[in-house]
Amino acid sequence: MVEVSATIKGALSLFDYRLSDTLGSGRFGSCYLISQNDKVFVFKIFNSNDVKRFKYKLALEGKYLKSINHTAIPKLIRVIDTDGIYGLIMERMPGDSLEDLLKWGYLFTKKEIYAIIKQLMDVMEYLYSLKISHRDIKASNILWDHSKLSLIDFGSARDLSSLSCRFNPDFWGMGDVFMRLALSSQEMTFSHHDFYIDDLNLDSQEKIIFKRLLHIEQPYDNLQDLKRDFVDRFSLD
Protein backbone atom coordinates (compact mmCIF):
# COMPACT_ATOMS: atom_id res chain seq x y z
CA MET A 1 0.00 0.00 0.00
CA VAL A 2 1.25 3.47 -0.89
CA GLU A 3 2.41 5.46 2.13
CA VAL A 4 -0.41 7.69 3.35
CA SER A 5 0.19 10.77 5.46
CA ALA A 6 -0.64 10.76 9.16
CA THR A 7 -2.89 13.76 8.49
CA ILE A 8 -5.19 11.68 6.27
CA LYS A 9 -5.27 8.83 8.76
CA GLY A 10 -5.95 11.30 11.56
CA ALA A 11 -8.81 12.96 9.67
CA LEU A 12 -10.41 9.56 9.07
CA SER A 13 -10.00 8.52 12.70
CA LEU A 14 -12.02 11.56 13.79
CA PHE A 15 -15.04 9.89 12.18
CA ASP A 16 -14.10 6.35 13.23
CA TYR A 17 -12.88 5.24 9.79
CA ARG A 18 -9.76 3.17 9.20
CA LEU A 19 -7.64 3.09 6.07
CA SER A 20 -7.67 -0.29 4.30
CA ASP A 21 -5.98 0.12 0.92
CA THR A 22 -5.07 2.52 -1.89
CA LEU A 23 -7.20 2.35 -5.04
CA GLY A 24 -5.38 4.83 -7.26
CA SER A 25 -4.73 8.44 -8.16
CA GLY A 26 -6.12 10.80 -10.76
CA ARG A 27 -5.83 14.37 -11.93
CA PHE A 28 -7.53 15.91 -8.91
CA GLY A 29 -6.77 13.47 -6.12
CA SER A 30 -6.56 9.91 -4.84
CA CYS A 31 -9.01 7.20 -3.81
CA TYR A 32 -8.69 4.82 -0.87
CA LEU A 33 -10.62 1.93 0.58
CA ILE A 34 -11.62 2.65 4.15
CA SER A 35 -13.64 0.71 6.68
CA GLN A 36 -15.96 1.30 9.60
CA ASN A 37 -17.67 -1.44 11.64
CA ASP A 38 -16.77 -4.09 9.05
CA LYS A 39 -18.27 -2.04 6.22
CA VAL A 40 -16.03 -0.87 3.38
CA PHE A 41 -16.30 2.52 1.66
CA VAL A 42 -14.37 4.59 -0.87
CA PHE A 43 -12.67 7.79 0.26
CA LYS A 44 -11.86 10.26 -2.50
CA ILE A 45 -9.49 12.96 -1.30
CA PHE A 46 -8.73 16.02 -3.41
CA ASN A 47 -5.26 17.48 -3.91
CA SER A 48 -4.70 20.29 -1.42
CA ASN A 49 -3.50 22.75 -4.08
CA ASP A 50 -6.66 22.18 -6.11
CA VAL A 51 -8.80 22.64 -3.02
CA LYS A 52 -7.16 26.02 -2.39
CA ARG A 53 -7.69 27.19 -5.96
CA PHE A 54 -11.19 25.97 -6.81
CA LYS A 55 -12.83 24.17 -3.93
CA TYR A 56 -16.23 25.42 -5.10
CA LYS A 57 -15.88 23.37 -8.30
CA LEU A 58 -14.69 20.26 -6.49
CA ALA A 59 -17.66 20.57 -4.13
CA LEU A 60 -20.04 20.08 -7.07
CA GLU A 61 -19.34 16.34 -7.07
CA GLY A 62 -20.67 16.01 -3.54
CA LYS A 63 -23.61 18.23 -4.40
CA TYR A 64 -24.66 16.02 -7.30
CA LEU A 65 -24.11 12.74 -5.45
CA LYS A 66 -26.22 14.02 -2.56
CA SER A 67 -29.15 14.57 -4.92
CA ILE A 68 -28.86 11.14 -6.59
CA ASN A 69 -30.61 7.99 -5.43
CA HIS A 70 -29.87 5.17 -7.88
CA THR A 71 -28.60 1.63 -7.33
CA ALA A 72 -25.97 2.03 -10.07
CA ILE A 73 -24.45 5.20 -8.58
CA PRO A 74 -22.52 5.35 -5.29
CA LYS A 75 -24.27 7.06 -2.41
CA LEU A 76 -22.50 9.93 -0.70
CA ILE A 77 -21.91 8.96 2.94
CA ARG A 78 -20.03 11.98 4.29
CA VAL A 79 -18.00 15.01 3.25
CA ILE A 80 -14.76 15.37 5.23
CA ASP A 81 -13.40 18.90 5.48
CA THR A 82 -10.92 19.13 8.34
CA ASP A 83 -7.20 19.66 9.03
CA GLY A 84 -6.57 20.61 5.41
CA ILE A 85 -8.20 17.40 4.18
CA TYR A 86 -11.15 17.70 1.82
CA GLY A 87 -12.78 14.59 0.42
CA LEU A 88 -15.84 12.44 -0.06
CA ILE A 89 -16.70 9.15 1.61
CA MET A 90 -18.87 7.10 -0.75
CA GLU A 91 -20.52 3.74 -1.01
CA ARG A 92 -18.24 1.09 -2.48
CA MET A 93 -19.79 -0.32 -5.65
CA PRO A 94 -19.33 -3.94 -6.80
CA GLY A 95 -17.27 -5.14 -9.74
CA ASP A 96 -14.14 -4.15 -11.61
CA SER A 97 -13.74 -1.25 -14.01
CA LEU A 98 -14.20 -1.98 -17.70
CA GLU A 99 -10.70 -0.51 -18.13
CA ASP A 100 -9.18 -3.12 -15.82
CA LEU A 101 -11.15 -5.96 -17.39
CA LEU A 102 -9.88 -4.93 -20.83
CA LYS A 103 -6.30 -4.76 -19.53
CA TRP A 104 -6.66 -8.23 -18.04
CA GLY A 105 -7.72 -9.60 -21.42
CA TYR A 106 -11.36 -10.25 -20.57
CA LEU A 107 -13.33 -11.07 -23.72
CA PHE A 108 -16.74 -9.43 -23.58
CA THR A 109 -19.61 -11.26 -25.23
CA LYS A 110 -22.03 -9.50 -27.54
CA LYS A 111 -24.80 -9.99 -24.97
CA GLU A 112 -22.68 -8.40 -22.22
CA ILE A 113 -21.80 -5.42 -24.40
CA TYR A 114 -25.42 -4.76 -25.27
CA ALA A 115 -26.41 -5.12 -21.61
CA ILE A 116 -23.73 -2.63 -20.54
CA ILE A 117 -24.82 -0.04 -23.11
CA LYS A 118 -28.52 -0.53 -22.30
CA GLN A 119 -27.91 -0.18 -18.55
CA LEU A 120 -25.76 2.87 -19.19
CA MET A 121 -28.60 4.45 -21.15
CA ASP A 122 -30.99 3.70 -18.28
CA VAL A 123 -28.64 5.41 -15.81
CA MET A 124 -28.29 8.40 -18.12
CA GLU A 125 -32.07 8.64 -18.42
CA TYR A 126 -32.28 8.88 -14.63
CA LEU A 127 -29.52 11.51 -14.47
CA TYR A 128 -31.14 13.55 -17.22
CA SER A 129 -34.41 13.52 -15.27
CA LEU A 130 -32.42 15.37 -12.58
CA LYS A 131 -30.86 17.67 -15.20
CA ILE A 132 -27.38 16.19 -14.55
CA SER A 133 -24.80 15.42 -17.23
CA HIS A 134 -21.97 13.07 -16.18
CA ARG A 135 -19.57 14.36 -18.89
CA ASP A 136 -16.86 11.76 -18.24
CA ILE A 137 -18.25 8.42 -19.39
CA LYS A 138 -15.33 6.11 -20.09
CA ALA A 139 -14.18 2.56 -19.40
CA SER A 140 -12.38 3.49 -16.18
CA ASN A 141 -15.53 5.10 -14.72
CA ILE A 142 -17.79 2.09 -15.27
CA LEU A 143 -17.71 -0.92 -12.95
CA TRP A 144 -19.07 -4.29 -14.10
CA ASP A 145 -19.82 -7.34 -11.95
CA HIS A 146 -20.83 -9.45 -15.00
CA SER A 147 -24.52 -8.68 -14.56
CA LYS A 148 -24.87 -5.05 -13.44
CA LEU A 149 -22.86 -1.89 -13.96
CA SER A 150 -22.09 1.06 -11.74
CA LEU A 151 -21.23 4.56 -12.92
CA ILE A 152 -18.66 6.35 -10.75
CA ASP A 153 -16.61 9.57 -10.63
CA PHE A 154 -18.91 12.57 -10.87
CA GLY A 155 -16.05 15.05 -10.70
CA SER A 156 -16.85 16.42 -14.15
CA ALA A 157 -20.64 16.40 -13.74
CA ARG A 158 -22.50 19.61 -14.52
CA ASP A 159 -26.03 20.84 -15.07
CA LEU A 160 -27.53 19.43 -18.24
CA SER A 161 -28.22 22.96 -19.49
CA SER A 162 -24.45 23.53 -19.79
CA LEU A 163 -24.16 21.01 -22.64
CA SER A 164 -23.49 22.32 -26.11
CA CYS A 165 -26.40 21.76 -28.48
CA ARG A 166 -23.88 20.46 -31.03
CA PHE A 167 -21.95 17.97 -28.92
CA ASN A 168 -23.10 15.67 -26.13
CA PRO A 169 -20.08 14.21 -24.27
CA ASP A 170 -22.29 11.58 -22.61
CA PHE A 171 -23.40 10.18 -25.96
CA TRP A 172 -19.87 10.28 -27.35
CA GLY A 173 -18.62 8.52 -24.20
CA MET A 174 -21.16 5.72 -24.65
CA GLY A 175 -20.03 5.30 -28.26
CA ASP A 176 -16.39 5.18 -27.22
CA VAL A 177 -17.11 2.57 -24.51
CA PHE A 178 -19.00 0.46 -27.05
CA MET A 179 -16.10 0.55 -29.51
CA ARG A 180 -13.54 -0.45 -26.87
CA LEU A 181 -15.67 -3.37 -25.73
CA ALA A 182 -16.56 -4.45 -29.26
CA LEU A 183 -12.88 -4.59 -30.25
CA SER A 184 -12.32 -7.02 -27.37
CA SER A 185 -15.14 -9.33 -28.46
CA GLN A 186 -14.51 -12.33 -30.68
CA GLU A 187 -18.19 -12.26 -31.65
CA MET A 188 -18.03 -8.71 -32.97
CA THR A 189 -14.66 -8.58 -34.73
CA PHE A 190 -13.46 -10.64 -37.65
CA SER A 191 -9.76 -10.12 -36.96
CA HIS A 192 -7.34 -8.30 -34.65
CA HIS A 193 -6.97 -5.64 -37.36
CA ASP A 194 -10.56 -4.39 -37.08
CA PHE A 195 -10.49 -0.85 -35.71
CA TYR A 196 -13.49 0.78 -37.35
CA ILE A 197 -17.24 0.50 -36.92
CA ASP A 198 -17.61 -0.61 -40.55
CA ASP A 199 -15.36 -3.61 -39.78
CA LEU A 200 -17.52 -4.85 -36.90
CA ASN A 201 -19.97 -7.73 -37.12
CA LEU A 202 -23.03 -5.47 -37.17
CA ASP A 203 -25.64 -4.75 -39.81
CA SER A 204 -25.82 -1.34 -41.46
CA GLN A 205 -28.58 0.03 -39.21
CA GLU A 206 -26.77 -1.09 -36.06
CA LYS A 207 -23.58 0.61 -37.24
CA ILE A 208 -25.46 3.86 -37.82
CA ILE A 209 -26.56 3.97 -34.16
CA PHE A 210 -22.97 3.97 -32.95
CA LYS A 211 -21.80 6.26 -35.73
CA ARG A 212 -24.40 8.75 -34.53
CA LEU A 213 -23.14 8.41 -30.94
CA LEU A 214 -19.60 9.13 -32.13
CA HIS A 215 -20.71 12.05 -34.33
CA ILE A 216 -19.61 10.25 -37.50
CA GLU A 217 -23.23 10.45 -38.71
CA GLN A 218 -25.89 12.99 -37.71
CA PRO A 219 -25.71 12.89 -33.88
CA TYR A 220 -28.67 12.17 -31.64
CA ASP A 221 -30.18 15.23 -30.03
CA ASN A 222 -32.09 13.41 -27.28
CA LEU A 223 -31.84 10.24 -25.23
CA GLN A 224 -35.34 9.00 -26.04
CA ASP A 225 -34.55 8.58 -29.75
CA LEU A 226 -31.28 6.87 -28.93
CA LYS A 227 -32.93 4.37 -26.55
CA ARG A 228 -35.73 3.67 -29.02
CA ASP A 229 -33.30 2.87 -31.84
CA PHE A 230 -31.08 0.79 -29.58
CA VAL A 231 -33.91 -1.32 -28.14
CA ASP A 232 -35.41 -1.82 -31.61
CA ARG A 233 -32.14 -3.09 -33.08
CA PHE A 234 -30.43 -4.99 -30.28
CA SER A 235 -31.83 -7.99 -28.46
CA LEU A 236 -30.58 -8.96 -24.98
CA ASP A 237 -32.21 -12.41 -25.11
Image (tube, grey):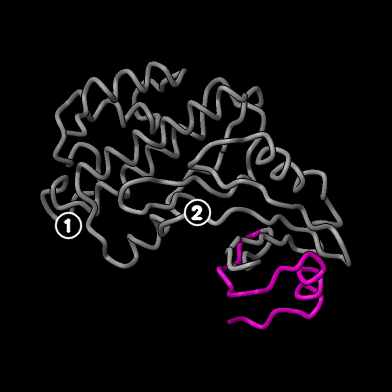
Count of numbered tags: 2
Residue at image mark 1: 192
In the rendered image, the vertical position of residue 193 relative to residue 204, given as above or below = below
Q: Residues within 10 Å of mark 2 (few under 14, many from 20)?
A: many
Task: Find residue 45 and report its image quarter.
Answer: bottom right
Q: Quadrant of the C terminus?
A: top left
Task: Determine the residue positioned at 71% across, 45% down.
Answer: 62
Amino acid at circle 1: His
Q: Nearer the viewer, residue 12 or 6?
A: 12
**Label 1 with label 2: CB-CB less than 8 Å:** no
- Which secondary structure lies at badge 1? loop
User: Does residue 33 belong to the magenta stretch?
Assistant: no
In the rendered image, the vertical position of residue 233 relative to residue 41, given as above or below = above
Task: Determine the residue positioned at 79% across, 59% down.
Answer: 86
Q: Magenta region: which residues? A: 1-27
- Foreground: disc 1 or disc 2: 2
Task: Determine the residue positioned at 66% across, 60% down.
Answer: 44
Amino acid at circle 2: Met
Residue at image mark 2: 93
Q: Quadrant of the N terminus?
A: bottom right
In the rendered image, the vertical position of residue 139 relative to residue 102, given as above or below = above
**Picture coordinates of residue 129, whole percent (x, y):** 56, 22
**Picture coordinates of residue 111, whole percent (x, y):** 21, 41
**Picture coordinates of residue 112, whole percent (x, y):** 25, 45
User: Does residue 13 belong to the magenta stretch?
Assistant: yes
Task: Find residue 116 and report its image quarter.
Answer: top left
The mark nearer the N terminus, 1 or 2, is: 2
Task: Determine the residue positioned at 46% across, 18% down.
Answer: 222
Task: Find residue 157 and report its image quarter.
Answer: top right
**Picture coordinates of residue 146, whole percent (x, y):** 31, 52
Q: Nearer the viewer, residue 27 or 59?
A: 59
Left or right of residue 178: residue 58: right
